[in-house]
Amino acid sequence: MRRIRIAGCGRMLAAACLMLPLAGCEGILQVQNPAAIGVDQLADEALLDVQVAGAMKALTDRIAGQGGTEESMIFAGNFLADEIITGLNWENWARVNQRLVDYADGPADPIWSDISKVVRLGERAVALIDSLAPTPDSDERKAIASVVAGYGYVIAGEQMCEGVFNEAFQVDDPDYVPTAIPPEQIFPLAETHFRTAITVATAANEPDIADLARVGLMRMYLNMNQLANVVTEFAGVTVGFEWWLEHSTNSGDEENNLYHELHGSNHTIGVHPNFLQGTFDDVDIIDTQTDPRHQHASNWDDGHNGTSHLYKPYQSMRFSEYSGETLAPASPACPACTGTTEDPDNGTIILVQRDTDVLLADYLEAQHHYYEAVLRQNPSDAAGQAFVDARRAAGNQAPYAGADWVAALREQRSKDLFMGGFRTGDLRRWGRDGVGNFFPTGAHPVPEWGSYGEWTCFPIPLEEYEGSPNLEKPANPLDPPAWF
Amino acid sequence: MHPILRRSWVLATAALFVLAVGAGPLQAQIGGTISGTVTESGTERALDGARVVVVEANLETRTDAQGNFEIRNVPVGVYTVQALFIGYSRTGRSVTVTLGSVATVDFVLNRAPIQLDEVVVTGTAGRTEKREIGNAVTSLDVSDLTSEAPIANVQELLQGRSPGVTLYSNSGLAGTGNRLQIRGAGSLNAGYRPVFFIDGVRYESNNVALSGNSTVQSTSPLDFMDPNEIERIEVIKGPAASTLYGANAAGGVVQIITKKGQRGTNRVQWNASFEYGQSSWYVDNPTNFYQCNASRIRNSSGSYDGCENPDSVVWKNQDGEQVGIPEEDIIRFGTPDDSMFVVTDDPLNRHPSAIRTGNSYDFKLSARGGGQLFNYFLSVNSEDQEGIFFNNFADRKGGRANFGFTPSGTFNVNMNFSYTRGHIRMPLSDNASNGLLRNAFRGRARARTDSWESGFHGFGPDQSNEFNLQIREERTILGTTLNWDPFPWLENRLTLGLDKYDRRESNLFAIDSLCKWGSPECTGATYNEIKSYHTWTFDYAGSFRADISQDVSSRFSAGMQVISRTFRQFDSDGEGLVADSLNTVSAAAQTFGGEQFNEQTSLGFYVQEQIGFRNKLYVTGALRIDDNSAFGEDFSLVVYPKLSLSYVISEEGFFNVGFIDDMKLRAAWGQAGNAPAPFSADRTYGAEVTFLDGVSSNAVYPDEYGNPALKAETGQEIELGFDAALLRGAMSVEFTYYKQNTKDALMSVPDAPSTGWSGTHFINVGEIQNSGLELLWTWSPFRGRNFSYDLTFAFSTNHNKLISFGETRDEVQFGAFTNSQRHREGYPLGGFWSVDVLRNADGSPDTTGGDVTVDFACSWPDNVDPDGRDGPCHEQFEGPATPTREFAWANTFTFFNNLRLFFNFDYKGGHYQLCAICSIRNRVNQNTWEVANPEAPADEVMFWESRQTVTHISAADWLKLREVSLTYSIPSSWGGPFRVSRWSVTVSGRNLWTTTKYTGTGDPEVLWVRDNFETLDYASVPQPRRFSALVQINF
């Protein structure tokens, strides 16, 4: 082989020549990301609408599971209460229905994530509208975004044991130390947003949004035990007001999550014995189903886990295809009963469908907030008692003959708002206010699970602590909190 | 097979014949001929496939099955002719060629398992011999392996044959992709895997998961490679060796070199093979029990009718539907009124459509040859494999064409083309609600008439087998490599390539009046995903060689690589197919669509200087600079250095150790990277749709939290070792010690949900350490004409430890069904921790309050039980989740040079496993003997029914008799008029025997890996036992 000698400096020069193109190769590394929107791009007036819609979408997901999510208030968010039992095979979720909550597992993370999303998207949209919209104080979008943020705080107070609320990217700062706050400090955070929404909606001539904000405000005050304020706000709510969270069959993304939980062999929820119009484990429960507000399939079948006996719930008053008809036929005991052929999917009393809408708020809910405030202050209030009997009549019940009108109202509230996402918050409020502890106790309806635990709310999940390392962990996150 | 596909494959086969035959002798007689034989010293065995090179004329060929070779048209002159074969010493002879003459030269090669002159792929241009390299490189001669062992794919090829390379089996289903890792888990991120190159072209090798369906096993792109097309595989194991490959190579590099023809052969060498095999289930199944006690017997709800009236239970076996539980399946306890008995069941084995014996058919045909200026290798293959489930198969059809053109002694072009089609059907498995094994293991022992099938927990086999998910794949690899050596001191190589991988996943649900699959599937639905991966390679490398003095040589290398990868996915779904004859998306009542895209480009440059001293001592230093589109905007270039030393001490005069033939000492230190995933630095929103006031409205949602400061993690490694040949080639030892640290480790952490984002993002945090030993020992204690014995023993250890989280967090807990795994400082990544129930002083379970209490509470790093119970945390470290030691022991006995018996053992140990389904069977299904036994103490039953994991996490060491084969080579004289040069018949078996410490279910080798390190045993499908018969013909 012919050999040559190359000086060391020559080789270094050759290396340097090869390195030179590095500076000019930046273009090679330019890649496209056509599937996402950069954060900075959203500071654009033309994109305000989609941000407000995004905030409302997040709220819809939280309440009713639009998009097929399983952690909605109606579903897993209500596992702690006594409306439904679950037949989920995922034990870490099913145990929540037994009031055993693990901050590192189960639905605590998706519930808290959804609540945070509602708050963040709502507040961010308000801030951008303030800075980019030509007339923010009469902009309908600001009113909607404010309502969303307000409801975010109300839901957080009802469902979470504690909450932590940061600006979006504060946790990136290694010196930032967030603080967890309890429900009594969370609820008041909603007030400013609801007040803003009422003011802006009134200026924009959007009475429905103003009504929605007022009902939200009543719900907040009720949870803060400020009963006089509840009474005051009720005066402004329009009779017959309704605000629906909407679903549609037009897109696969638009699905009420309950649809999935009720249909097919893998269905996962059934009516809790407390709301069953018959004896648990019995079959052919028809004649006793005289109250149209919390009806269910007449026979149980096993759920997703192959173990739990589930009576599928039919649509209650919070759902758009509620018919008011009863499974029970007319009888001397129930002359108003209608009777109907049971057909889970196609009858007049039906399971939730893909396009079933869910009430976020309505006048009936406002009435319940109002009369609870009234009767708890004065159980002899005639209007309050008349409201109780009117609601009993709606359920084919005889007028109330007892003395505890507050308890009677609580019963009607539970039926009127059945599976509307209120129950956990109601039970916590009544416990917090000293009315009583009505959370389910003793043996769980699914014998294999054993007895109920003691949790009444969802803890801040492990994901929050891991994503925000300066947030101080509780001494033992597996212990249920001492408060409701 | 579809008729069009069948026709295409037939056409491809025909084309191969035409090409091969047409590419026969093209040269007129212009010189003389060199011919002869190459045999093995001692045994006189003919060496099939040995390279014979006429050095000065730049001609070469390979021997046939009888060891014969012939090189025609050699110009008149005097030449050095060399014979080379992996595992044997190079031998050269001087030959004089005259016009029209035939010069005969026979070579007898001595075994030399350590070949310091062997040329290996290093990333630089030109030939690099093993003696120059300061790190360990494992070379697998695949052509030798495929002829002695039943190897179906590249995954099996790598299994247990290269110390330090660990293959984790995800499932025994046909078509399943396994996980490959080299030298342990160097990252908290799952992406720490080796990168693959095929003939220099980057090959997409990560397993492909089925979008949206985690209960169907992912498939492996490596299965596209037909092992018979591979000449050799080189494994470069760690950052010390892979520096030149840059920001994606910290997990190691696997170079696959496919077969080539030989110039000057002037004839076609054909190889055809046909293999038939059978796969079957061979592991024990857990028995299901069901306790019929008084309350269940009296229960009238119909839930437990097996207890109420066992004589009326309807169940199914091979003979069809049966009524009444057989007495032999009932354990009675002598109660007077028969109010207590236990029913037993093994539903998987008794049911006629649960498991089957799967057939496989494998056909391969190849041709290789070459003329004066060109060479070629052509092959086609067809493989059809049935799984042991009725709705599982994996078929593959493909071909390869490699052409080489050498117009001059200084320039050559190699063009490689391969095309493969795959068709796979995958069942639901592991923790699928409607999966077969899960429902069999969780069944209630026929004591209960289930919704679908007695004895199964939900769907039985007839229902599970309806699951119809099919994957159709196409893969095309195009590569061109130009080598230009204008001067002996200057070498250039340019590789351009494309790896194009397209697949369609189609999941069809027929209309089902029973609505077993739920809605909307029961209305008839089809879900389709079309995925397309394109990976482009541009790789230039140049080397200058120079002598600085008589003793000192220099080799300076530089290069540039661009790897660009795009991924695009289209989703198209249809629901409501209305009639059974419809199965297209457009025919459905409702249709849905979607699209995903990502892109990643890396750019790297390197320079390397190698100084050689008297061809014995080599010092190499290198620097690699990388940039990557996935790095954050706050981060730019990354620089990786490397330094290595190789010293062939056995060639020193002072080295006088009689039993050592050759010995090389080596040491290497280097760094390489592991780049984050595409777009993982970007903070983004996504778009979706919602409804406001009944009107469809576009909306946005927080999508990726991202990390603008994201960069590649850096693996840094030092390795020391030696390669030695001993006892005149009868023995070889390759020993390596390595210590590897990963800094700025990429870790996926949750987005703090309070930000509004709720996924995960990567951060660079902490440090991970891997260290271990690797030993490859070969020994041929007997080598004779009538009998020889060869053994290969590969042993490795790996000790993995999380050194630090960089003070950013305490620990990470995870695990399926229970948080039993941890990333905790000072412990191996993903290690297992168990929890027990609280116990009394005498060790019995504490049942205060009427039940046992599992003590989960633990607050690391305080290590104090926050509940104030005595002592520290009650959790107990059990051990690592990945093996700490492995060995493979291969044995080959050869009788009379034509009968060969091969078998090998495979072992992994030191790791632990969680049997999640054992826990679920106890506490949820209560179908184990511990719980169903009516005579068991009550507190013990409570213990088993609790969420304790102390009995369910166990050592998972296993030893398998992996492969056994018997090959008989029929003498060539039997070839007769067909010009057959060699026939061989092989019968073989795989997975024939297993012993294990593991106390869970199924096959201890198979683990369901859900996410990164999260592993568990949850009704995973075991590796099947496979028997096959193979006929190979060379002519």
Image: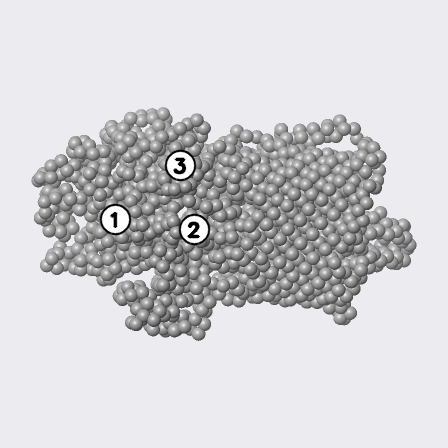
Residue at the disc numbered 1: A441
> What whole-number distance in Å separates the C-alpha atoms at marks 1 and 2?
27 Å
Label 1 neighbour load within 10 Å: few <14, some 14-19, many 20+: some
User: Circle 2 marks a residue in which chain?
Assistant: B
Q: Position of residue B884 (x, y in %)?
A: 57, 48
* Disc ID at residue B949: 2
* Disc ID at residue B71: none
Give the amino acid at mark 3.
Glu
Residue in the picture at 27% in, 52% down: A443
A126 sits to left or right of B176:
left
Callouts 3 and 2 on one subunit: no
Q: Nearer the viewer, mark 3 or mark 2?
A: 2
Q: Quadrant of the C terminus of chain B?
A: bottom right
Seen from the viewer's position, the closer of residues B758 and B140 is B140
B549 sits to left or right of B892:
right
Extreme residue in the front direction: B842
Residue at the disc numbered 3: A464
Residue in the picture at 67% in, 54% down: B793
Task: Look at the numbered disc 2 and give the secondary structure of its residue.
Answer: loop
Callouts 1 and 2 on one subunit: no
Seen from the viewer's position, the closer of residues B573 and B791 is B791
Give the amino acid at mark 1.
Thr
Q: Nearer the viewer, mark 3 or mark 1?
A: 1
Task: Identify the image quadrant of residue B380.
Answer: bottom right
Task: Identify the image quadrant of residue A118.
Answer: top left
Task: Identify the image quadrant of residue B130.
Answer: top right
The relative height of residue B663 versus residue A25 in the rendered view (above or below) is: below
Q: Nearer the viewer, mark 1 or mark 2?
A: 2
Task: Look at the numbered disc 3 and give the secondary structure of its residue.
Answer: helix
Residue in the picture at 45% in, 28% down: A174
Q: Position of residue A105 (x, y in %)?
A: 39, 44
